[in-house]
Image (tube, grey):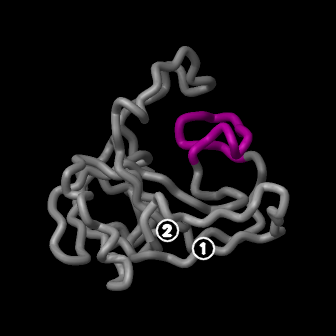
Amino acid sequence: MEIINRELIDFKERKFPDKVCFKPIGIINTPFTSLKGIPIQSSMSDVKGTIELFPEYQFGLKDLSGFSHSYCLYFFDMVKLPVPLQSKPFLSNESKGVFAIRTPFRPNPIGISILQILEIKENIIEVTNVDILDKNRILDLKPYVPELDTIETTKIGWLKGKIKKKVS
């Protein structure tokens, strides 16, 4: 389906479900088989991995190789729900609200990483900057575009002065 031919539900007829379900589009293969030792963010990693898109989604990779980086949204399948709404992050000795930290332990355990695309062959994407546990299910990929995605900020909350290269 082309974007210009997309179909939307009429605004007045929208329904808001209590649960939203996603079907994974692939899996990521990484060297990380435990949370210990994983870089705490993709920008702090030089580790390589591969995303294996399920064959029915391979057609959607057209033109992605023209981008150097991609957002990768994935599901933290090992998180046991419910999670606490406050916890102590790696870079603090004090508890913080879950929406002010980047923990995998979230009410909806969805992760986001910006991965550098090294090569695409058929349905396999070789990437680097990996900070994702092996075999996590991929929910979506979106191209990273600096002119659209980089925002100059004036505040970084409790993280001010605490960011260094760290692993879990």
- Could you classify mark 1 by the number of other residues whose Cα lies within 10 Å: few (under 14), some (14-19), or many (20 or more)? few
Q: Vertically, is 107 above or below 40?
A: below
User: What is the quadrant of residue 22 in the picture?
Assistant: bottom right
Q: What residue type is disc 2 on?
A: Leu
Of the numbered discs in the image, which one, if any, rests on residue 42? none
- Residue shown at the point (56%, 73%) measured from the top left: 77
Circle number at residue 139: 2
Instruction: Give the amino acid at mark 1.
Output: Phe
Left or right position of 59 against 142: left
| Whether label 2 touches label 1, CB < 8 Å | yes
Residue at 44 percent across and 29 percent down: it is 163
**Element at badge 2?**
strand
> Magenta segment: does it hold 136?
no
Residue bounds of the magenta highlight: 87-102
Secondary structure mainly formed by the magenta segment: loop
Residue drawn at 55 percent across, 27 percent down = 159
Q: Which residue is mark 1?
A: 22
